[in-house]
Image (cartoon, rainbow, N blue to C red):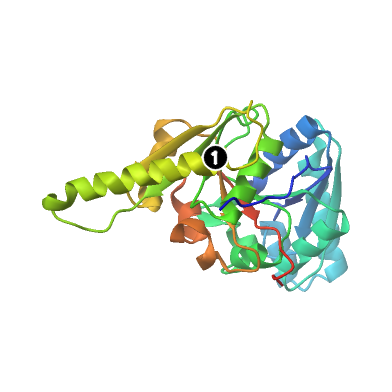
Amino acid sequence: MTHKASGPAVPESIVLATDLSARCDRALDRSAQLAAQWGARLVALNVLDPVALPDQALAWASGASDDELMHMARQELARDLAGLNVQAQPRIVRSNDPAVAIAQAAKAIRAGLVVTGVARNEPLGRFLLGSTVEQLARVLQPPLLVVRNRARRPYRRVLVATDFSAASLQALHTSACLFAGADLGVYHAHEAPLSGLAEVDARDAGLLAARQRCAAFVADSGLSATLRLQTVVERGAVASALPRHVREHQIDLVAVGAKGGGSLRDLLLGNTVAELLQWLPCDTLLVRELATDSQG
């Protein structure tokens, strides 16, 4: 069966979600690089967090008003944006729900991408506590780029992780559009059931079938025949096999597809995004499957 994916477009607007701390500096640089590459508008969004910065925390503890804290946040955001090679529009909002605030801002400016950072292997750091990544996956329509590494250059090696679902097909189409100049590959980890040595032939047959299915997935993707896609199918659990492959082959970005309306536990590959973000040594692009008429 051939899945169909809607044709994505290069973003005209990008939202950078920042908590104003050093942990978001890499996301700031990457969002600026992408905005320059695509000629896109960049909006730097901060959901006011009084304890994000030392001086803000001290002022908050001393009884500073919301207006005073907002003024401090505006000053800090202006300093962060001053050295960029692109013009960025600062925006600060008050909200008790950062995920909803980010999603609303992205919708308001019709953002084609939301960018944020990681710290201490914790997605989005203190700015987005606990389940905010999962909440974003549920409410955020545009792709979410989680930046781990320095933006030394445009993405050159992009890998799309697939379980052959419509969600992973959407991730493939989105990656092909956004990073047209990169080396694009498709990756699948085939985890065979535990078995004895007597069933080695069966495991090899399963790996061969997975490779054939991956080739069919690419052939039926609807992408241009002139686009050369490398396919990689390896045996093992994706949580360990994919990070190892990324490290060995110096992959810059991994794209994964999230089922529309589902939680992170419904993501492709049977793993949570939190687990993938914890172990992948590169940036990660989360692409939500576009809703159909039967989806909410």
What percent of the width, then of the height, locates residue 88? 84, 42
Expressed as whole percent of the image width and height from the top left, the position of residue 43 reads: 82, 48
Which image quadrant is residue 124 in?
Answer: bottom right
Residue 281 shows up from this direction = no
The amino acid pointed to by label 1 is Val
Name which residue lies at 53% across and 66% down: 266
The answer to whether 262 appears left or right of 275 in the picture is right
Q: Quadrant of residue 85?
A: top right
Furthest-front residue in this view: 1
The one of 130 and 74 positioned closer to us in this rendering? 130
Front position in the image: 119 or 108? 108
Mark 1: give few (<14), some (14-19) or many (20+) Cα within 10 Å.
Answer: many
In the image, what residue occupies the spot 60% across and 62% down? Answer: 259
Relative to 53, is 281 on the left or the right?
A: left
- Residue in the picture at 73% in, 61% down: 56
Residue found 76% across the figure and 30% down from its top: 37
Relative to 121, 89 lies left or right: right
Q: Position of residue 36 (x, y in %)?
A: 79, 32
220 vs 94, nearest the viewer: 220
Q: Quadrant of the C terminus?
A: bottom right
Mark 1 — residue? 218
Residue 228, given in percent of the width and then of the height, sits at 57, 27
Along the line of sight, which residue is nearer the eye, 63 or 192?
Answer: 192
Q: Most extreme residue toward the left, as rendered?
A: 198
Secondary structure beneath disc 1?
helix
Q: Is residue 135 above or below residue 251?
A: below
